[in-house]
């Protein structure tokens, strides 16, 4: 799955993989709140998500108080 983030001027353009329709948590859950507060994310910000935990699909979700995206 591939996530895309680009900017057209100051407007963010997001490409979300189709698995986002089936997974409870995706990278969109990590990125979208930052986009909505007008934070301009860099390649380094996105790369930092590569070092961290995957969503374990726990029976009771405790996100954001878990290892996902950390």
Image (spheres, rainbow, N blue to C red):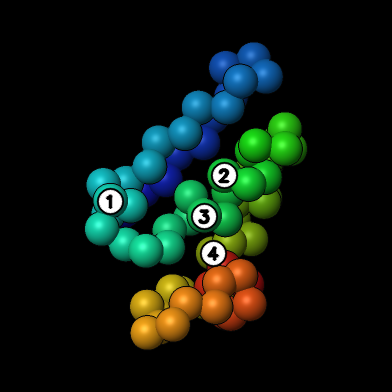
Give SS at disc 2: helix
In the image, residue 50 above or below residue 34: below
Categorize mark 3 by other alpha carbons within 10 Å: few (<14), some (14-19), many (20+): some
Residue on which disc 2 sits: 32
Q: CA distance from mark 4 to mark 2?
A: 16 Å
- Whichever of labels 2 and 1 marks the residue nearer the N terminus, that label is 1
Who comes first in sequence, dot 4 or dot 2?
2
Disc 4 from disc 1: Cα separation: 21 Å
The reply to whether the C-beta atoms of the residues labelled 3 and 4 are less than 8 Å apart is no
Asked if marks 1 and 3 touch (Cβ < 8 Å), the reply is no
Image quadrant of residue 26?
Answer: bottom left
Residue at 37%, 84% in the rendered image: 59
For marks 4 and 2, give the one nearer the viewer.
Answer: 2
Give residue 21's mark: 1
| Label 4 with label 1: CB-CB less than 8 Å | no
Image point 58% across, 27% down: which residue? 12
Residue denoted by label 4? 50
Q: Residue furthest bottom?
A: 59
Residue position for label 3: 29
Question: Can you give x and y, in whole percent of width and height, for residue 58 in the image?
Answer: 40, 83
For image coordinates 67% across by 19% down, the residue present is 10
Quadrant in which the C terminus is drawn: bottom right
Q: CA distance from mark 2 to mark 1?
A: 15 Å
């Amino acid at each position: 799955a591939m996530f895309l983030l680009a900017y057209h001027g100051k407007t963010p353009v997001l490409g979300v993989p189709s698995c986002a329709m089936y997974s409870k948590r995706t990278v969109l859950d990590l990125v979208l709140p930052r986009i909505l507060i007008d934070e301009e994310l860099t390649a380094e910000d996105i790369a930092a998500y590569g070092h961290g935990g995957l969503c374990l699909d726990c029976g009771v979700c405790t996100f954001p108080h878990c290892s996902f995206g950390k």
